[in-house]
Image (cartoon, rainbow, N blue to C red):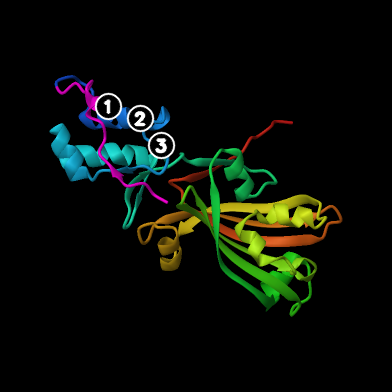
Amino acid sequence: MAQAEQALPEELFLDIDRSGPIPLYYQVASSLERAITDGTLPPGSRLENEVALGERLGLSRPTIRRAIQELVDKGLLVRRRGVGTQVVHGRVTRNVEFTSLFEDLERSGQSPQTQLLSAEKRVADEAAAELLGIEVGSPTLFIRRLRLADGVPLALLENTLPEPFANIDTDSLTRHGLYKILRSKGVNMRVAKQTIGARQATAEEARLLDMPERSAVLTMNRTAFDNSGRAVEFGRHCYRPDLYSFEITLVDR
């Protein structure tokens, strides 16, 4: 749960030089960043509004707005409709490897939460059948989840699983990552085909991810295979680019 709106201690800004060459917005942003980094402003803290902060510091609203935007761009603050400006842990940088987002968040010290939006049995259409290597009309399980980090929406996850893995206890999807659940069923995932891209969010995606309409989202499509070469799941995921990025290491052989 988000904390109450917090008036920032004025001592954070005592070293602001109003006559020096360093822009005022940059000095304010640097002071806020130090407070976030050293824990003075812990994750979940809500900043007072731009007008109130500007009046207390004797600075213009555009100066405060630009300072806050600097930290939004760094993934240290997030603006949320109906909540205000809130401190987050920072941008999640995900190595492109065989892990789930749930596991990545836990490893980075963040608290993942999941809202299960849909879990329904479907018959495979031509696209799903081709991706999963099954017959058209075969039973599948379609799941759709909203993944949050410390209460902030981060990603929208859609996955389709073939019949052998369609008996997942869907309640467990709110407590664990999909790959952990599959491993607990004896699935030994070996390889995946993955595509990373970007596109404009749909109106529903923007609403669920708490983003302005027409925002861009990062996308990842992945089909995972077990050690026998059988497809075990296909996923279509989209992520907030202000809070999430992919990291790829290239090796020259």
- Residue position for label 3: 42
Give the residues drawn in magenta, as a range: 1-18
The crowd level at tag 3 (other Cα within 10 Å; few <14, some 14-19, many 20+) is some
- Rendered-image quadrant of the C terminus: top right
- Residue position for label 2: 35
- Residues at marks 3 and 1 touching, judged by CB atoms closer than 8 Å: no
Q: Amino acid at mark 1?
A: Leu
Decide if residue 203 is in sight here: yes
Q: Residue pushed farthest right? A: 228
User: Principal SS element in the magenta part?
Assistant: loop
The crowd level at tag 2 (other Cα within 10 Å; few <14, some 14-19, many 20+) is some
- Residue position for label 1: 12
Say which residue appears at 67% left-offset and 56% top-offset: 178
**Would residue 231 be found to the left or right of residue 142 on screen?**
right
Q: Amino acid at mark 3?
A: Pro
**Would residue 149 be found to the left or right of residue 215 on screen?**
right
How far from the left and from the top, in percent, is residue 115? 54, 61
How far from the left and from the top, in percent, is residue 91? 47, 41
Nearest to the observer: residue 158 or residue 102: 102
Query: The residue tagged with tag 3: helix, strand or loop?
Result: loop
Q: Earlier in the sequence, mark 2 or mark 3?
A: 2
Q: Earlier in the sequence, mark 3 or mark 1?
A: 1
Nearest to the observer: residue 172 or residue 26: 172
- Residues at marks 2 and 1 touching, judged by CB atoms closer than 8 Å: yes
Instruction: Give the quarter of the image for residue 55.
Output: top left
Say which residue appears at 20% left-offset and 37% top-offset: 63
Say which residue appears at 82% left-offset and 60% top-offset: 230
